[in-house]
Image (spheres, rainbow, N blue to C red):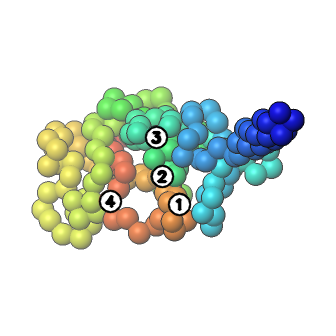
Amino acid sequence: MLAIVIAVAAIAVVGIVIGVSALNRPTPASQAAAGQCIQDPAGSSSVYVTDCDAKDAAYKVTASGGTDCTTVSGTTTTYEDLCMIGLDEDPSISLAGVQEGDCLSIDTSTEEATTTECTSGTYPVLKVLTDVDDTDLGLLAGNEDACQAAGVDNDAYTSWYKWNFDYFRSDSGIDLTANTNDLVFCLGDPQP
């Protein structure tokens, strides 16, 4: 009888130890929810959710897996299927979520664009395209660019602006090899 009591107690202790250690396991970044922070995925094969105030916090998740990041305002970076922004980045630099009718301000010295109110000198967005190959922008060849092919009014259309997320992949770090642009904005003449 004493042996049974000792065996049951030993099993209970083992169960408690396993349960407590499971509670202390870090949550993989792939399970992060919007508003949570993750470690920097650059050069690491194991990235975890961390407290946003922690030293190892690098990115805040703007939308969790399965979301089209091009529609999530404030997103600058993707990791696997998470939409994120760097903790040190200004959300206004993100062009994700820009829609037809919005305006872009393009800095002539840096060629960086930000979304802004439609005031003098800003460019009205006539159409937003996603997943546009460089060859479809007339960068390599062709008579008609992607904006024209999408039916943008040629009388209103003057130029396009392309914008891309930074991409991290768990198997290779940051991915800079893509020839496809996440967002292309078909722009009209600057506002008077």
Residue matched to label 4: 180
Q: First in sequence, mark 3 or 1: give its number.
A: 3
Question: Disc number at residue 170?
Answer: 1
Tell me where residue 60 appears, x and y as whole percent. Answer: 63, 41
Q: Residue at x 47, y 65 (%)?
A: 175
Q: Secondary structure at mark 1?
A: loop
Question: Disc number at residue 65?
Answer: 3
Q: Residues within 10 Å of mark 3 (few under 14, many from 20)?
A: some
The Cα atoms of the two marked residues, 4 and 2, are separated by 17 Å
Q: First in sequence, mark 1 or 4: give its number.
A: 1
Question: Could you say which is closer to the camera, residue 27 or residue 22?
Answer: 22
The Cα atoms of the two marked residues, 1 and 2, are separated by 7 Å
Q: Is residue 183 left or right of residue 48?
A: left
Q: Residue at x 30, y 46 (%)?
A: 130
The N terminus: image quadrant: top right
Please name the amino acid that badge 4 sits on: Thr
**Dot 4 and dot 2 residues touching (CB under 8 Å):** no
Please name the amino acid that badge 1 sits on: Ser
Tell me where residue 131 appears, x and y as whole percent. Answer: 30, 51
Q: First in sequence, mark 2 or 3: give its number.
A: 3
Residue matched to label 2: 80
Q: Residue furthest front?
A: 1
Q: Nearer the viewer, mark 4 or mark 3?
A: 3
Question: Could you say which is closer to the camera, residue 40 or residue 28?
Answer: 28
**Dot 1 and dot 2 residues touching (CB under 8 Å):** yes
Please name the amino acid that badge 3 sits on: Gly
